[in-house]
Amino acid sequence: MKIVVCVKRVIDYNVKIRVKPDHSDVDLTNVKMAMNPFCEIAVEEAVRLKESGVATEVVAVTIGPKAAQEQLRTALALGADRAVHIDTSAEANERIESLTVAKLLAKVVEEEQPGLVILGKQAIDTDNNQTGQMLAALAGLPQGTFASEVKISGDEGDKKLQVTREIDGGLQTIELSLPAIVTTDLRLNEPRYAKLPDIMKAKKKPMDVKSPADLCIEVASKVTLLKVESPAERKGGIKVGSVDELVDKLKNEAKVIS
Amino acid sequence: MNIDLTGDELAFRDEVRAFFQNELPPQVMEKIQRGLRISRDDQIAYQQALHAKGWAGANWPVEYGGTGWSATQKYIFNNEAATAQAPRIIPFGLTMVAPVIYTFGNEEQKQRFLPDILASKVWWCQGYSEPNAGSDLAGLKTRAVRDGDHYIVNGTKTWTTLGHYADWIFCLVRTSDTGKKQEGISFLLIDMNSPGVSVTPIITLDGRREVNEVNFEDVRVPVENLVGEEGKGWTYAKVLLTHERTNIAGVASSKQRLKRLREMLSEPPLGMPNLIDNSVFMARVMETEIELKALEFTELRVLSAVSTGKAPGPESSILKIKGTEVQQMIDELYLEASGHYALPFVPEQYEEEGDGIVIEPHFAPNTAPHYYNNRKVTIFGGTNEIQKNIIAKAVLEL
Amino acid sequence: MDFALNDIQQMLQDSAAKFIQNDYDFETRRRLTESELGYSEENWKLFAELGWLALPFDEAYGGLGGSLTDLIVLQTELGRGLVVEPYFSTVVLGGNLIQRHGSESQQSELLERLIAGELKLAFAQAEPQCHSSITDIETSAERSEEGYHITGHKAVVLGAPSADLLVVAARTSGNRGDQNGLSLFLVDPAQPGVTMQAYPTNDGFRGAEIRFDSVKATLLGEVDSAYDAIQATLNDAIVALSAEAVGVMEKLLNATVEFCKVRKQFGQPIGKFQVLQHRMADMFMECEQTRSMLYFGAITVAGGGEEASHAASMLKVKVGSAGRLVGQQAVQLHGGMGVSDELDVGHFFKRITMINTLLGSRDEHLQRLIRNAQAA
Ligand SMILES: Cc1cc2nc3c(=O)[nH]c(=O)nc-3n(C[C@H](O)[C@H](O)[C@H](O)COP(=O)(O)OP(=O)(O)OC[C@H]3O[C@@H](n4cnc5c(N)ncnc54)[C@H](O)[C@@H]3O)c2cc1C
């Protein structure tokens, strides 16, 4: 079985976000970028399925500028076998909307014919939480979102996928027929650290580069970003002298207890 | 201008020297020789030996049992003490709270507290700083509320040096919230054994317990423990702070440490790198020595002004800044002189109950812990940044 | 010209940073330094798995053939985490000496075990009378029919308590101060005749005084000719240690800036006081200057030759001066909190201070540079 795993290049989650002075967007100059953490979990899951013999090949896909190849290399270093880069450097608008991403991915799915597609449930830059769902709709495949556990059972030819989903207040387990789409939640697994030998080998693994035009998808922009604002500044902590003072402050200043 | 010692002064010097050679308590003597730290008991024994000699109250007026020494005599005493590597005098009782009590306290307080301080029968600690009131001391929040003939005290003091040894603590507390922040502060003496006082250790970078957090929970303090007037604590404390700053300079002990270093440079003990040919290092030694000499004279100028009746003014900030900077320069010279033997952490070599030499050169193991710990001197007693603010404002009128 | 990390270095940095972030927070590190062993064997195995132990070694021995620049990427991250596992003593010192000076069979056997995480090393070089000179060696090795026997006192041997094998520099001929006549030996520290006085160091590592009393030793590589290998290894080691220093300094700077933004006195964040702003601007510049010097040092030392030692000294001087300023000011700006053991800042300060005393201090290297200039 082949697994396609999708990864996105985002601001490293340790970086403190700065907004451009004109509030037009987040300032990305000289900012460290990394693989979206949920995508890392997706890669890890795919690689584990390969290591356990369930999958035979893991293909990592990204859509983004040339630099996004760094994240594909990381996926390769973590254990993916080959990579597909859909290069959007030539597009007028560098902000590619979720629907366009889903359409592009649907094309990749059509070409690759994987048994399973794994994506992060959302990317930490824009928190859209919709690409996986849209892809499922466009590709006409069943989906298991917010996965905290993924199990594959059954014989060759009649494999079933069990997905445990994190839902409000509990867990839900569903069974899907393959091929299917899974989006990962935080607790699905703990991604490994890339090993240095694998990092070096990653350089030699194949990477296909395509443009949206190659896939016959037009990158149109239908949503306009109007304004970005930083979250309200966190106030510094204070040290209280006694339990009474703490209770008093919680009551009268923070107003979190009554 | 004259710095020669008179005949009397020379005689005084010999007397002091003889005291340090012959009259120190034996257990203190032994620890000095073995390079071990002094315990609480040793410290008390030492200060009591000074008291027996009539030398405990070096800065005190004679009427309260002080020595009545001239500036020169104090200078001589400090130099001899440093040469003998005698312990420093723990300042909280003898040089910090006592001047406040004999200057601003009432007759009853003087009689009640001063004799025990002079005889080192009671150990005092200083309760000024709080978690949110460090440099901005006037922002302190520990509250004393009047309840009949008691104050009820609630709050937290921190960085309290040797609070775990102390019998009494002198505190700045808030007695009023109206008006200027400074005007609501009072000077209160609190028995550490009162119910509601708790002491928690804070470990410093050398791995030792030297400072503490002191908590007050509904501590009842008799009103007669208030020094002077309610709301005047800030003014009293400021007088005390200038005393504290003059004290911090540590010129005599810096001189002594530098002198010992120079001796070792000429004849390096086992395990010490040969540094006398290192002109980079030697340049630092010489610069430190020059700075220290200038400081010594600055201190003499301040002391002789004080002995003619003037109180130490904002110039005391110079002593604090330069004195602590020189101390830290010397710390760094010792670090260099330890070479790679600055690395081993072997407290058994220098702790109170240690076994003595584990590593040669003998001075090396304590150099890094001391260097780490002694970063405090540019922080406490008002940080050096705050001292410079004082010079800028009060002296330069900027 | 390009100072950007390449793909491989970037990924190495990311994975090392992630390890520190997830598995090596300050409290974990504190527990390790307080444990009996002083570090974690589990981490050591992980380092082996991640290929970190293989980084600088030839592919012929199962290494990854990484460059000095690859090594500084990793070392900087280890500095940020104040990592106490004996990487420096095993890989940077011991392993490099074996790679440079060992015989073919020693290289393949020992490096393979090292890379697998099964062999930890320590380099016993300095002696009580010699703090950073390579040639001022009194420890001697006598040859008899049963082979070599070593006698002498080695000082402050980092990583010795956990080492499976010691690499010992000893004199086989010539006199104190001669370059010729220095040899390297492998010594099993568990043998009779080896007395080890182990201690923690002031910055959370482990070290020991070691006394050898006619202890059986195996010659590493050729006799009498170890000087060049030691010299080159120590130059590499200065670069690696300086990389760690850069990680430590950048942590100190960041922690201080963050602290000054939230600590309030006189009704405002103390970071608003201009005098502190300038202080932090100075710290920032020193960090950047040191990083620049690190790149210069790494490139020049990798090039070898006369220039290498000169560049290593220049780098070590810069690390000493800048580390002093950044460390001291970080503590000062934290006020009382700076000298408390509870906060991580003090521990980074301790490490940067001790880095200056390792492999020759600022003063020693500066003096060396002056002497060379006078001789030229
Ligand atoms: C070892 C030790 C022992 C001590 N012992 C005692 C004791 O026995 N009793 C007691 O009451 N206190 C004691 N102190 C507390 C000491 O007095 C305070 O630490 C000191 O006043 C600084 O306060 P802080 O630590 O809150 O630092 P902060 O006030 O938070 O200062 C942090 C930094 O900001 C700088 N800063 C603050 N305000 C300004 C400004 N306006 N302009 C420029 N720079 C500024 C400071 O210089 C410092 O570098 C001790 C402290 C130490 C470290």
Image (spheres, helix red, strand yellow):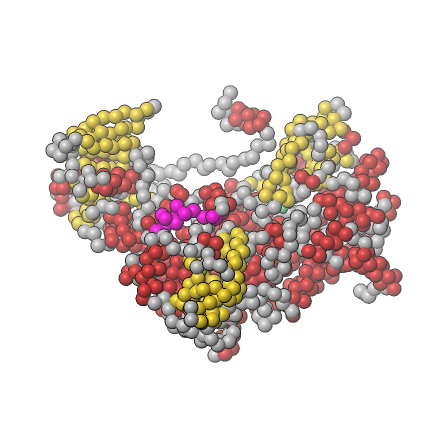
Name the quadrant containing residue A213.
top left
Residue C42 magenta = yes
Q: Residue visible at 54% across and 43% down?
A: C342
Give residue A252's position: percent from left, percent from top: 54, 25
Where's residue C256, x and y in %? 51, 48
| Residue at point 42%, 71% (across, down) | C145
Q: Quadrant of ligand 1?
A: top right
- Say if B268 sits above or below A209 in the image: below
Q: Position of residue C275 (x, y in %)?
A: 56, 51
Compared to residue A197, the image places residue B222 above or below, namely above
Where is residue B329 shown, x and y percent of the image? 62, 59
Secondary structure of the magenta portion, mostly? helix
Indicate whether residue B181 is drawn in magenta.
no
Residue at the spot x=56%, y=25% of the render?
A248
Look at the image and tell me in which quarter the N terminus of chain B lies: bottom right
Span of residues in magenta: C37-48
